[in-house]
Amino acid sequence: MSTVTPPLPYRVTAFRPETGDAVSLELQPVETALPAFLPGQFSMVHAFGVGEVPISVSAIRGRDGALVHTVREVGAVSGALCRLRPGDVLGLRGPYGTGWDLDSATGTDVLVIAGGIGLAPLRPVVHQVLDHPERYGDLRVLVGARTAGDLLYRDELESWRTSAQVEVTVDRPTPGWQGAVGVVTTLLDRAGPLGDDTRALLCGPEVMIRHTAQALLARGVPARRIQVSLERNMKCGTGHCGHCQLGPLLLCLDGPVVDYARSGPLLAVREL
Amino acid sequence: MTELPFLLDALPQAHRDRLLALARDNSFPPGGRLFDEGGQADRFWLIRSGEVALDLYVPGRPPPVVQTVGPGQLLGWSWLFPPYRWHLGAQALGPVDAWEFPADEVRALCTADPVLGYQLTLRCAEVIGERLRATRIRLLDLYAPRTGAP
C-alpha cells in the first residue's frame, strides 16, 4: 500500500467540450508536478469543497507535467469539475494504478476497443503507438458510442485514420449519420484477422468489456493478451479503504488495467 | 477487399469452393436498395466493402436504421428459413461490393450435401446468435447518461 498524500494544486489551462456531458480539461501544475503518469493510470481529482473522484488520464503532454483529464458529468463532483474553466484550480493525487502493458505489445499488432467514455483512458495508448510506429505492428481502433454526438475526440479520430484503421459504430443513428450502427463487437469482423499475438486493450462499461472479451476469445485471442480497464468504487487510490475490491484484487493498486486471464473469472462472480 | 468473411473462414476448403462457385460479384451504388421488408428472400450476400443499413418500415417517417452490416459480414439469413421473407429492408450507405449467392441453389446444395448444409447452418446460427446477443446489449443502453455517481 502507498501513502495517501494531499492533493497538489493544478490549474486548468484549456477547456474543451467533447460531448453534451463530457469535457476535457488540460491541467498544469501550479507549483510541484506529480510524478510522470503512464497511459492507463488515474488521478484522484479533487474539486475543492465538493469532493474527489478517480479519473484516468486521457493525454500526457510532454515533460512539463501537463495532463488532460476527460470528465463526464454523472454526479456532484464530476459536475463541479465539468464547470471549471481556464484559470480555475483543482487538486490532483496520483499517479495511481497499473497502466496499459505496452511493453508486451512491442512488435505485435495493437487492437484498441473502446465504448463510450472508455475511449479516454485508451487515448494515451493510441498516442504512444502513433508516436512510435517502429515499436508496434498494425494499430486498429474500434469505437462504440451511443450516438454520433456522444463520440469523444471526433477530430482526432479522423486524424488517426492516416496511420491506423479506425472503425466507429453508434447504438442509435441520428439523422445524417452514415457510419456503422450496432455494438462495438460488430466491428471485429471488419478488423481483419486477429492473430494470437494481437494485444487487445478494452475499456468501457463492464458488460461491454465482458461481451467484447468473449468475442475476442472466440476469434482466437488468448485471455492473457486481452487487457481490460475496470471500474469499481475507488475512494482512497492507495489500497487502504477496500472500496474497489474485486475478489483478491484492489483495483486502485492491482488495476484498473488487468489482463482478462486474471479478471475474467472474477467478473463472472456475481457476489463481487 | 476484405479478408475471407467470417461466415466462410471456418468451412473446409472443399465446402468453401462449392459455395463460392455459386456466387457472383455484385455492386450497389450509394442509396441502392438491396431488398425490402416482406420481400422474397431469394439471395444473400457476403459484404466485401462498403456498408449496408438494415431498416424497418415505419409509416410517416424515414425508415429507422436498426443495424448496419459491413465488410466481412453476412447480409441476409431469412433465405435459410421458411417462409423465406425478409424481416428488414436493406440499403447501401455508400458504394458496396459483395459476393451474391442465389438462395435456391445454396439450399439445394445443402440438401444434396447435408454435411455442407449442417456446417453452413451452424455458421449462420452463430452469426444470428451473435446479433441477438448484440441486440440485447444495445437494449441495456450502456452508454446512457448516468446519475447518482460522484
Image: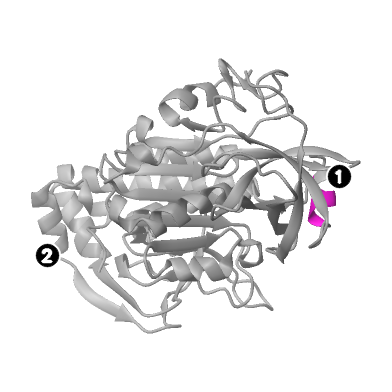
Q: Secondary structure at mark 1?
A: helix
Q: Amino acid at mark 1?
A: Ala
Cβ atoms at labels 1 and 2 below 8 Å apart: no
Q: Residue at x 41, y 26 (%)?
A: A261
Q: Which residue is mark 1?
A: A76
The residue positioned farthest toward the left in the image shown: B14
Q: Secondary structure at mark 2?
A: loop
Residue A168 is situated, as x and y percent measured from the top left of the image, at 49, 62
Give the answer, above or below, for where B104 lies relative to B35.
above
The stretch in magenta equals: A78-82
Residue A248 image-quadrant placement? top right
In depth, the one of B128 and B48 nearer the eye is B48
Quarter holding the C terminus of chain B? top right
Q: Is residue A136 visible?
A: no
Give the answer, above or below, for where B145 lies relative to B54.
above
Magenta-colored stretch includes residue A62 = no
Q: Is residue B60 left or right of residue A61?
A: right
Foreground label between 1 and 2: 1
Could you tell me which chain the residue with mark 2 belongs to?
A: B
> Can you tell which mark lies on residue B21?
2
Spatial CA span between label 1 and label 2: 62 Å
Give the answer, above or below, for where A2 lies relative to B103.
above
Residue A41 is situated, as x and y percent measured from the top left of the image, at 57, 39
> Can you tell which mark lies on residue B105?
none
Q: Amino acid at mark 2?
A: Ala
Neighbours of disc 1 within 10 Å: few (<14), some (14-19), many (20+)? some
Q: Residue at x 29, y 46 (%)?
A: B123
Q: Is residue B66 left or right of residue A23?
A: left
So how many labels did they put on this image? 2
Quarter holding the N terminus of chain B? bottom left
Q: Is residue A228 left or right of residue A20?
A: left
In depth, the one of B2 and A194 nearer the eye is A194
